[in-house]
Image (tube, grey):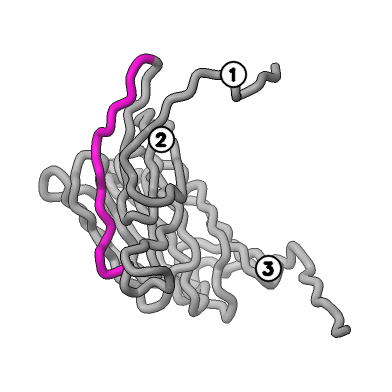
Amino acid sequence: MAGDLRKCPLRKLEGHNSRVTSCSWSTEQGLLATGSQDGTVRLWDISQNSTDLLHTHSCNSEAASMSDGSVGTHLLSPVMWSSRGTLLAAFQNKLINIWTVRGSQVHVETQPSWVTAMSWVQSSCPFPSQVASGQANTAESLLLGRLDGSLCWLEVSEEGGVGGVKVESTDLSHCQRKEAPQCLSWYSTDRPFAVGYPDGKILLASTDSFDTEQPILLTAFHVCTASPL
């Protein structure tokens, strides 16, 4: 079925003070998250009859001074929801901003190199070790790619009341490459994640060490180089 969107009812959301750079729905919460160059992430509850601004989350103020843009401009990555819809994340240069849906404070994780890609795990299934022990896993997994070619695994969980966040960081040294990751995708913690690179390679690896499971590097695309004129 096709239709003209210009004839559909429109609803304007007003709140950001600068250019909106991303919009993302949460399938679990039914909420809309919007990110902007004003350094804020806003949560909206949108129903058929009403539109409510639930929260305004601020990014780390130091990131704007690190950006190449004008003063006060935040070069914020697209906002991403965790699999359970309880956490939000976006990166700026070397900084990872993490928020809880219920809280207002930002938790910042500083990386040794600029972040080039990020992805939450898509499925919230527990780790195999926790299934065996009967323990429930409350942490959400966030995978980071950096400009120096390294990968980092963050286990993020809510802690200490409303808005509190605990993060455990693990560098995946067995996945290091010279190329900076361009995109990431991770379905489940018990399955390999995929990393795409500008040189046409795709890395399939897991969080286990190199001795446990060796990463696989695929040549998916041949990068064409232009001949000199």
Q: Nearer the viewer, residue 203 or 48?
A: 48
Q: Which residue is mark 3?
A: 201
Boundaries of the magenta span? 49-63
Asked which secondary structure carries label 3, the reply is: strand
Q: Nearer the viewer, residue 214 or 33?
A: 33
The quadrant of the rendering that contains the N terminus is top right
The reply to whether residue 189 is visible in this rendering is no
Query: In the visual, does 8 lie left or right of 144?
Result: right
Residue at image position (33%, 69%) is: 71
Query: In the visual, does 105 lie left or right of 40?
Result: left
The quadrant of the rendering that contains the C terminus is bottom right
Residue at image position (35%, 74%) is: 66
Three-letter code, disc 3: Lys
Image coordinates for residue 63, horizontal then vertical, percent = 31, 68
Query: In the visual, does 207 lie left or right of 3?
Result: left
Residue at image position (39%, 35%) is: 32
Asked which secondary structure carries label 1, the reply is: helix
Q: Which residue is mark 1?
A: 7
